[in-house]
Image (cartoon, helix red, strand yellow):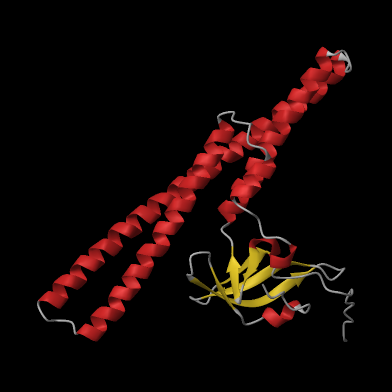
Amino acid sequence: MPKPSSNPFHFVGKAVSDEYGRQIGRIASFLTSPDGRINTVFVEHGDGEFLRYPNTQFKVNGDNIVILPAVKLKVKSLCDEIPLIWRKDQALKELSEKKRVSTEMFNDIHKSFEGALSQLKVDAQATMADIDNQTEKCVQQTSDLHSALVNLEIEREIGRIDDKSYQVAMGMIQHGLKRVNAEKIDLEAMRSKLSNIVLGDASATPVEAEAEEEAPGPEDTILPEPPVVVHVKQSS
């Protein structure tokens, strides 16, 4: 896989797509911290709207710049954090049973772990609700595309559309069905994994979760760290 340019502004004007091949827009600019690190990417969408995304949401896939769904990153974070805190709490209980932690210290730390787990599970429930909404949109879109396909066949059958236009439209609809089906499968897998975690299945370690769904590694990051710190001098 070719590595990104060391100059992140090389990507300005480049097209951005999602994991399923849908065109999102083009990279317009970046937001940098005082030490030269880029942490935000500005994207012009196809409708002309400019939106900002965290740098961690992007990766390079061959020659393509891909923006990862925010919900996928959220699910990965929750599936890492919930089992980790659960195992820490279990380790704390074992230390308490071995009289290696005072009762007062155990109560304080155990309470903090319970609070963190409770908040993470609230976040997980909200994330699953978001996944359910997105899945329902996929179901509706699939229904709409099948309807479009049937009507296309009817129009061709009665001779109101020529073969060339029919083939173009058929290709568009088939690609749309393939993309939305792939997205729906991903959403269902994410919800299942997160649901198991929330229900108390802490047997899956963060490492195992990463094996199923790898996050972009350093070589995939779209915006590598600059080799030197850039100091900007303001002109009067």
Residue 220, x across and y down, in percent: 69, 66
The quarter of the image holding the N terminus is: bottom right
Residue 40 against residue 4 in the figure, above or below: above
Label total for image: 0
Question: Would residue 33 appear left or right of 28 to someone viewing this image?
Answer: right
Residue 168, x across and y down, in percent: 30, 80
Question: Would residue 233 appear left or right of 107 to someone viewing this image?
Answer: right
Residue 152, quarter of picture: bottom left
Residue 68, x across and y down, in percent: 59, 61
In percent of the image, x 89 and y 17: which residue is there?
100
Residue 71, x across and y down, in percent: 56, 52
Residue 225 against residue 203 in the figure, above or below: below
In percent of the image, x 89 and y 75: which residue is there?
228
In percent of the image, x 35 and y 53: which residue is there?
139
Question: Would residue 154 appear left or right of 148 to someone viewing this image?
Answer: left
The quarter of the image holding the C terminus is: bottom right
In percent of the image, x 72 and y 29: which residue is there?
87
Residue 236 against residue 93 in the figure, above or below: below
Residue 127, quarter of picture: top right
Residue 105, quarter of picture: top right
Question: Would residue 155 appear left or right of 78 to someone viewing this image?
Answer: left
